[in-house]
Amino acid sequence: MNLDEIKQYLTEKNYDAMLITRNNHFLGQDVLETENRILALTGFSGSAGTLIVTPEKACLFTDKRYEIQAARQVDPQTTDVCCGTKETLIGWLQEKFPGKAKMEYNPWCLSAQEADTLACRLPKLKLIAKPATENLEPASVFAHELRYCGIETTEKCRQVTEFLHQHGCNACLICAADSVSWLTNLRSDALPDTPVVRAMALLRADTGLTLFADGLSFPLDNSCRILPLAKMEKEIAAAKALTFAFDKQNTPEAVRKMIEKHDIRTLPVTDPCLGFKARKNEVEIKGIVNAHLHDGIALCKFLYWLENTDADLSELDIVEKIHELRTQQPLFYSESFPTIAGVGANAAIIHYQPTATANAPLEKNSVLLVDSGGQYFNGTTDVTRTVALGHPKQEMIEKFTIVLKAHIALAAARFPRNVAGNVPDVICRNIMWRYGLDYNHGTGHGVGCFLNVHEGPQNLSLHGSAYPLDENMVVSIEPGYYRENAFGIRIENLARIIADEDTDMLKFAILTMAPLDKRLIDKYLLTNEEISWINDYHREVCQKISPYLTEEEQIWLKEACSSLS
């Protein structure tokens, strides 16, 4: 149905609204363009959004990252756009429907936590569930080999089962695709940039693991019991004597309704795979470091090419070149997300992506923001570099240097164990605040190992996850500055959280290996400690990457990484 057909449907049913999310029944995961209902209905391509349709109009709710993008993509004649915190989804519904009202939603595409929030904050709003699962495209499943994942599935199941016992449970329904992928050591080609297996799993202490999936071709030697999603309720009912761990945030409301229908006893326990998955094991760490080495080789070759080519280039040329260079690296599988390559004003659109119809030429005396990453069988990468084109304006140099100061403040910081991600976020953002600046996104996100490039439970954000940070988690550090219709700057490295040898605290070990553009650095705005950090980082990049470059590239990298002082 299009928007007009939905409005007619609501009128015929005498409903007041329909709630539509970007999700399919695998909450919080990537979706194909053909599965993205919000894209189809509004033209908005961002990764976060909820749409409310009434018989009169539609309203799209997204966050501040997409303020410029949503305004460009969405037709204001058909759909209002609400970004940020001033007008929230709950507040809008409370104002729109102060009395009794009816709203239809798909309980497969809304978490139990979200459904509870709506019911609590809007007690007069009747939520009408209309379950519908997507017919997903067929996909092939393959093993993530032990030399890359480090731990056998049987051992992972033992760890999770022990965790369940410690929390008074003997069963768990795991609904997050990345958790199932980690637990089973399986990956798939269902999505172009994210090799998760789109399946759910029932883990019972007495009978082991059962997967529920549609349209997937599993390897012949797979040891898991596999059933279609339609069989899940029957399996839940058969486990009635067990006590289930129940994660409201990661479980679709439709699944909770099944559990309640069969009077299954539950205890509130966070998805037990999350913590194990976030803390990378020794084999994963070794692989992730190696993946970043080879990703750094591709990045340095790209930066050399960009600086030394005489061709007239466009944003799509940038996308194509960096992809070409990554494909030459060992163990490369795919991009980890569609490359962001924005020049000038396009760089101010936080998640801008060039297309055949929106492909700007590189303009002189400006900056180019390139945010890209790779999926390697042994790790996932994500890096942003902002590069000078010609002679950038002094304002660009000043803002770049301030963003760099913020980045260094966190990259060099120590912080206590068991703190949540809001603490490191403030360490970084505080530098920006000193200059009266800020950015409309988190400071960092968790990263999987040949899984999601954005993967919790950890993140670095003012209003993000309360999950405590711990050793061997991988996160991004990516402050930025964006001036609409002018330019944008972001500096992103991935880092591993490690123990500080001199204290009982934690710190970051940078994984990303690519030089920062010194043409955009005003060293007179930097402290001696910040200059030392940059010099040390560049020295490491040069030492590790140079052996893999041509003689001309080595000469360029030596200069790009030469000392600031």
Image (spheres, helix red, strand yellow):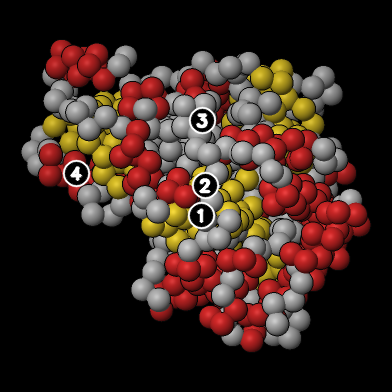
Q: Is residue 462 left or right of residue 142?
A: left
Marks 3, 2: nearer the viewer: 2
| Nearer to me, 101 or 58 | 58
Distance of label 3 from label 2 (alpha carbons): 17 Å
Of callouts 4 and 3, the N-terminal one = 4
Residue 509 at x, y = what percent? 72, 68
Q: Secondary structure at mark 2?
A: loop
Q: Residues within 10 Å of mark 2 (few under 14, many from 20)?
A: some
Q: Earlier in the sequence, mark 4 or mark 1?
A: 4
Q: CA distance from mark 2 to mark 4?
A: 41 Å
Residue for point 30% across, 47% down:
83
Residue to which mark 4 is pinned: 92
Residue drawn at (84%, 24%), measured in percent from left and top?
221
The three-letter amino acid code for the residue at tag 3 is Thr
Amino acid type at image mark 2: Glu
Residue 366 badge? 1
2 or 4: tag closer to the N-terminus: 4
Element type where label 3 sits in the image: loop
Tell me whether circle 2 and circle 1 mark residues in contact (CB < 8 Å). yes
Q: Return the residue found at the far front.
A: 310
**In the rendered image, which residue does mark 3 sit on?**
355
| Badge nearest the viewer, 4 or 1 | 1
Residue drawn at 78 percent across, 66 percent down: 559
What amino acid is at disc 1?
Ser
